[in-house]
């Protein structure tokens, strides 16, 4: 039987204060340079879109680990579930969060995102950098 094939298509940052920011996932490697900027103390949620081909994927999960100046400051794990192959992309929206605020929260962060299944098969592992600033970047 065929191995399930999961392809993460995009990551969107949704915030009530801003238009949605859709970030395409690079075909190979990691996003180059600063991937995005968030405003301190702002509400946001993440939305993924992905496809599943060949076979059912069970226990698909998302892990995101964030570091600032080499120290781990955040780690999120979310079980996304079981998905059957289909032509249309799936979307999954994470619970809303609030970015940290204050002078010590501002600056550059590095992060690693992973999508894996119950068999620890890795569908995406990506490192990227983002900033938290006093204000949103001008559009």
Image (cartoon, grey):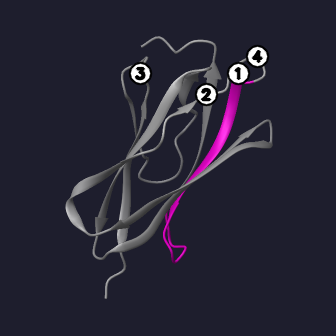
Indicate which disc residue 103 carries: 4
Tell me whether the residue at label 1 lies in contact with that at label 4, contact meaning CB atoms closer than 8 angstroms.
yes
Range of residues picked out in magenta: 105-123
Which residue: 52% across, 42% down?
31
Tell me whether the residue at label 2 lies in contact with that at label 4, contact meaning CB atoms closer than 8 angstroms.
no
The residue indicated by pointer 3 is 16
Which is nearer the N-term, disc 3 or disc 4?
A: 3
Task: Work out which residue is located at the far left of the displayed protein and give it.
Answer: 87
Find residue 1 and report its horizontal and vertical position in percent: 31, 88
Q: Is residue 21 left or right of residue 76?
A: left
Which is nearer the N-term, disc 3 or disc 2?
A: 3
The residue indicated by pointer 2 is 99
Which residue: 29% across, 54% down?
90
Which is nearer the N-term, disc 1 or disc 2?
A: 2
Indicate which disc residue 106 carries: 1
- In which image quadrant can residue 106 be found? top right
Report the Cα–Cα distance between label 1 and label 2.
Answer: 10 Å
Find residue 26 and report its horizontal and vertical position in percent: 43, 47
Q: Nearer the viewer, residue 34 or 84?
A: 84
Report the Cα–Cα distance between label 3 and label 1.
Answer: 20 Å
Label tally? 4
């Amino acid at each position: 039987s065929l191995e399930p094939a999961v392809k993460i298509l995009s990551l969107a940052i949704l915030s009530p204060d801003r238009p949605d920011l859709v970030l395409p996932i690079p075909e190979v490697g990691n996003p180059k340079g600063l991937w995005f900027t968030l405003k301190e103390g702002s509400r946001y949620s993440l939305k993924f879109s992905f496809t599943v081909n060949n076979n059912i994927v069970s226990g698909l999960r998302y892990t995101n680990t964030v570091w600032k100046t080499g120290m781990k400051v955040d780690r999120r794990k979310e079980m996304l579930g079981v998905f059957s192959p289909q032509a249309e992309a799936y979307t999954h929206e994470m619970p809303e969060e609030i970015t940290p605020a204050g002078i010590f929260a501002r600056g550059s962060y590095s992060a690693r995102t992973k999508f894996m299944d119950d068999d620890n098969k890795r569908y995406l592992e990506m490192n990227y950098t983002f900033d938290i600033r006093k204000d949103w970047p001008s559009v």
